[in-house]
Image: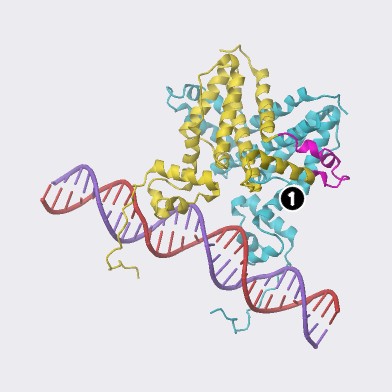
Chain colours: A cyan, B yellow, C purple, D red
DNA sequence: TCTACTGGCGAACACTGTTCGTGTCAACTA
DNA sequence: TAGTTGACACGAACAGTGTTCGCCAGTAGA
């Protein structure tokens, strides 16, 4: 039933830009930044090059690999300054704020970071930097490794949750601070309206439940994790 | 073009068990526990009742609501003992170990916990318990609220990551400890084989990178988060 | 000049969540 | 008792998904 069409083939368009792995990643990131990671489908990415989805599979094993490549690409944006062991905890915080910021800047891409064991070259660079710094700071190596992994987990999880909040209230027009304020108010009345007999604390302290900005909450957890590392140092820094 | 078939309808099977919201959640959880959350499709759940997917929509708004209901169901498994403010930090740890354990017992359901702002009744119960305990323990209310949220975030993120590890190495036959050991060995040689010039720490301390069980790593982060709360207490407990 | 091979790509497969319109049946109303 | 309403059941279809197959064009090597 399948036959070759005997009409002259309609001018088969030579790909104006012969497909290329890096450009595929670029296009996928563009889509993800603009419309979210769920908008990144093979068809959607291929459409960016005026072609069909099967054309991508010559350059990328499957969608999973594409997502990994996207994540590792943005891992390359992380700044890794020279180690300063005498203030290593501060440096760790700065690195984490930096990666947090990068994740937030890329919409809900944090989700793919959570959904994989990161092992791309750029992610490894960051881990290498972290492990080295914690060891220089005096942490026993295995605790430095644990700290590295735990803190990255916290950062990516927070970035993902933040992207959820942004998505849930599609007040897209509003500036960031405005949207966050409105969200807090809505959540506040939600807690306050809970039945006081079964939820005395949540309803009574509804103000506390919604206190603070998302940055403050992030910083609160970050402080807990990193300041707590001090007690494990077994040698003096450097 | 659409006509009613004039043949006698083939014996329309009366649903042997008239569909019911709770039973739908049961079935979905059964599937998720056995085959993972990705196996939970509306068709798959409906098939459990020998019917089609559209039958579910009378009892559940959409798939998202079904996932929320599934999560809130297992939140009901969390044990909430009476508050003991004089040892509140220990009690918080116990609660978190308990929920962690429950999440792990339900395959990769932790993912849906991460992908939503939890607001089901059972999740609220747990938050109420946590907020009350931290306040009784002497925390300022807004910090108690933050701690509650941050620690739950950490617990669910860890549970999700753990489910990823289990999934990635489908050594399904192996007992849990065996599989974890094998995973550690594989990862160990991966780190050790990294080029030592660019990754001196990761390759040199490959043993440290893979040290410890998943429980120990979880506990490490949990200690950092909860022990660190002590410095914020502003009143004596009770 | 013939051959291999690579990349491009249309068509198809087996899925997904959701909606529409029709069907049945129980319960309430006149 | 007869009629109507409303809730639930559900087959079919729609628009989308990731991926594979097989054919095509063009180039590099022998």
Q: Position of residue A196 (x, y in %)?
A: 43, 23
Q: Is residue B92 above or below residue B189?
A: above
- Rendered residue at 78%/48% (across/down): A121
**The image quarter in which residue A133 lies:** top right
Mark 1: few, some, or many residues within 10 Å (few <14, many ≥20)? some
Q: Quadrant of the N terminus of chain B?
A: bottom left
Q: Position of residue D10 (x, y in %)?
A: 36, 57
Q: Position of residue A191 (x, y in %)?
A: 49, 28
Taking the image as shown, residue D2 lies to the left or right of residue A99, namely left
Viewer-proximal residue, B17 or A165? Answer: B17
Taking the image as shown, residue A178 lies to the left or right of residue B203, namely left
Viewer-proximal residue, B136 or A218? Answer: B136
**The image quarter in which residue B236 lies:** top right
Viewer-proximal residue, A73 or B196? Answer: B196
Q: Is residue B199 magenta?
A: yes
Q: Is residue A92 magenta?
A: no
Taking the image as shown, residue B216 lies to the left or right of residue B86, namely right
Q: Quadrant of the C terminus of chain B?
A: top right
- Rendered residue at 31%/68% (across/down): B3
**The image quarter in which residue A175 lies:** top right
Q: Could you tell me which chain the residue with mark 1 belongs to?
A: A
Taking the image as shown, residue A208 lies to the left or right of residue C29, namely right
| Residue B64 seen in the current view | no
Q: Is residue A52 above or below residue B113?
A: below
Query: SS of the residue at dot 1?
Result: helix
Which residue in the structure is indicated by mark 1?
A73
Numbered label tally: 1
| Highlighted magenta segment, given as a residue range | B191-212
- Rendered residue at 61%/37% (across/down): B159
Q: Position of residue B69 (x, y in %)?
A: 46, 40
């Amino acid at each position: 039933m399948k036959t070759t069409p005997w009409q002259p083939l309609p001018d088969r368009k030579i790909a104006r830009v012969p497909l290329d792995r890096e450009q595929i990643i670029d296009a996928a990131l563009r889509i993800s930044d603009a419309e979210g990671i769920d908008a990144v489908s093979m068809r959607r990415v291929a459409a960016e090059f005026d072609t069909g989805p099967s054309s991508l599979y010559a350059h990328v094993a499957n969608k999973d690999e594409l997502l990994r490549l996207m994540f590792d690409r943005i891992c390359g944006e992380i700044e890794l300054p020279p180690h300063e062991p005498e203030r290593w905890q501060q440096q760790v915080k700065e690195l984490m704020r930096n990666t947090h910021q990068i994740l937030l800047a890329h919409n809900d891409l944090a989700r793919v970071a959570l959904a994989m064991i990161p092992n791309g070259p750029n992610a490894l660079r960051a881990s290498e930097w972290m492990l080295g710094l914690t060891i220089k700071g005096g942490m026993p190596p295995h605790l430095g490794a644990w700290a590295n992994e735990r803190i990255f987990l916290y950062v990516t999880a927070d970035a993902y949750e933040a992207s959820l909040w942004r998505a849930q209230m599609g007040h897209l027009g509003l500036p960031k601070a405005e949207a966050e304020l409105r969200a807090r108010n809505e959540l506040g009345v939600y807690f306050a309206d809970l039945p006081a007999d079964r939820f005395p604390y949540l309803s009574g302290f509804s103000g506390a439940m919604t206190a603070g900005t998302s940055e403050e909450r992030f910083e609160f957890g970050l402080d807990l994790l990193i300041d707590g590392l001090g007690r494990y140092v077994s040698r003096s820094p450097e």
